[in-house]
Amino acid sequence: MTIVTAAPSRDISMAGGLLVAGIVLATLTEAIASTVLSLGRGDIIGDTYATPDEFAWLDVGYTAFKLIGFMVASWLMNRFDPRSLIVGSTLAMGMACGMAAMTARLDLLVALRMVQGFSGGILLVGGQAIIFLAFPRSRQPILQALFAMGSVVAPATIAPALQGWLLDSQSWTWIFFSIVPLALTAAGLLLIADGPTPARGAHRPFDWVGLPLISVALFCFTYIFSQGSRWDWFEEPRILWPAVIGTAALLAFLGQQLLSKGPGLFDFTLFETEDFCFAFIVSFVAGAALFGSAFLIPSFAVSVLAFTPTDAGQLLLPSAALFIGALFMAAFLMQFRHVPPVATVPFGILMIMTSMWMLSGSTSESGAGDMMAAILLRGAGLGFLFLSITLIAFGNLNSRNLASGIGLFNTGRQLGGLIGVAALQTLIEHNVTHNLAVLGANVTAGAPAVTGRLTTSAALLTAKGMDAAAASRGAASLLGRAVAGQSTVIAFDTAFNAIALLFIVAAPVLVGIKIGLSRYAKARAADRGISVAIEPPRHRTSPLKRVPAL
């Protein structure tokens, strides 16, 4: 175990403040980089002359290497100074983004996106682990709320607004350029922060067999969930073969980890903690809700309501205030009123369900004002949900497996998001086709309503100067567009309802899992002759000397 000491400081509270500020700014760089393709897709495709299949590698490469970064961050923190590792990852992110802003070569952009993803995965895990290890547990609710502002709030609300404005006023390159000063500022704050510094100690051997296996598995699954909807899933060999290879690599990885004599890449002791097991399962559902709703709302605004990138990005911005407010309200209740973290989970779930149900009533005539109440409610629900899950997951982990737990939890949340978005894309595509067939079957020539609509539209076009034949064709075309538009609206409404139904189905399942885990933990404790009710608290031995709270 690496032993860490802290350098003396005249004002340790200031050192703690600089450390947290540097980590939060570092997470902002990842937040902007991770969402750059959500609104800038069309602009980047136009400048790089890439086909949709070629362009997809920008997203696949980033996400796959981010997941790989989650898995190796624990070993890197054991091997190197954690603070220096975060500084290096932040500078690598800034350098890769600066280079990406100056090139339109697709192959170079793909390579740079891989560097960005790997750096982002490491700084997210390392930054959160340092906050847990450097500060007392009693102060974690507020500190983790601050960390969530950069890691969860920013990519879900603030980054899309910034990117939409830059796309409309400048170009997509400015999105990458905006990351450079953030990265430099974050690195500077971390360097001057008088935080914990490590001493030399024993290091874990690197798992040269496990890393290639899990990397192949994560890369295959990322490609499947990102491109499966486009290629009709397993009907195409390009999806079927990665599924076979990825599954085989994952099984081989798990087998290799179980059979390895020394500590491997995967820490199985994490699942001896009941709370982490439960939170890890919940992370998939929470990721699906977060990423799925963040995908649906801007997509609906752009494709159905014809919002500009700026308008679509700003649509989620007001919810940031309620998101942050809910985070700090939950943190206040947990830190000062000693409310257990699980108490706010039902409120978060109920708010997200209600907001998705409200959005399912949107129409092609809806505007930002009509959707705002639901969007604000979603922000509050996410704030109550994510802080609670974080504290439940990591509150009882020790310094040996904390970083591994954070990496695995983030991997679950990211995979849950990929699965959720892929399922919603497939649902929308299938529903659009089905709705077109159903609505089209009722739009038949000779029907009074259809004839009246065509006659009215043709008359309007004729009044605009078109001849009778062209006006008749134009009226038919307008009717077809109206049917297609209504089919899309119904498909999106169904997708919003699907997220609400996800929680209706998942909530009782998660409650059952929680009860089952609790009974298993009690039975295991009874077998060891230990009463859970009087079990003394486990004190973590931190490899970082704690810094007093701000």
Image: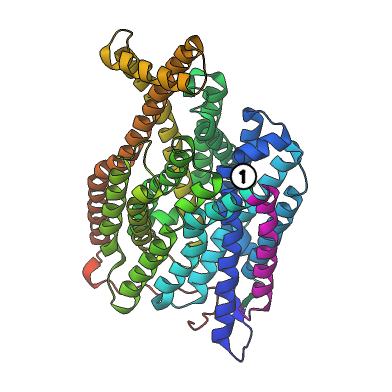
Whether residue 121 is visible, yes or no, is: no
Residue highlighted by disc 1: 62
In this rendering, position of residue 501 left or right of residue 86 = left
How far from the left and from the top, in percent, is residue 268?
Answer: 45, 52
Instruction: Judge whether residue 190 is colored magenta.
Output: yes
Seen at 56% across and 34% down, the residue is: 223
Residue 27 lies in quadrant: bottom right
How far from the left and from the top, in percent, is residue 251?
Answer: 49, 36
The boundaries of the magenta stretch are 169-195
Seen at 48% across and 17% down, the residue is: 474
Name the dominant secondary structure of the magenta segment: helix
Element under label 1?
Answer: helix
In this rendering, position of residue 209 left or right of residue 375 = right
Looking at the rendered structure, the kind of residue marked 1 is Tyr
How far from the left and from the top, in percent, is residue 98?
Answer: 74, 54
- Check the image and report above or below for 126 versus 134: above
Seen at 70% across and 53% down, the residue is: 97
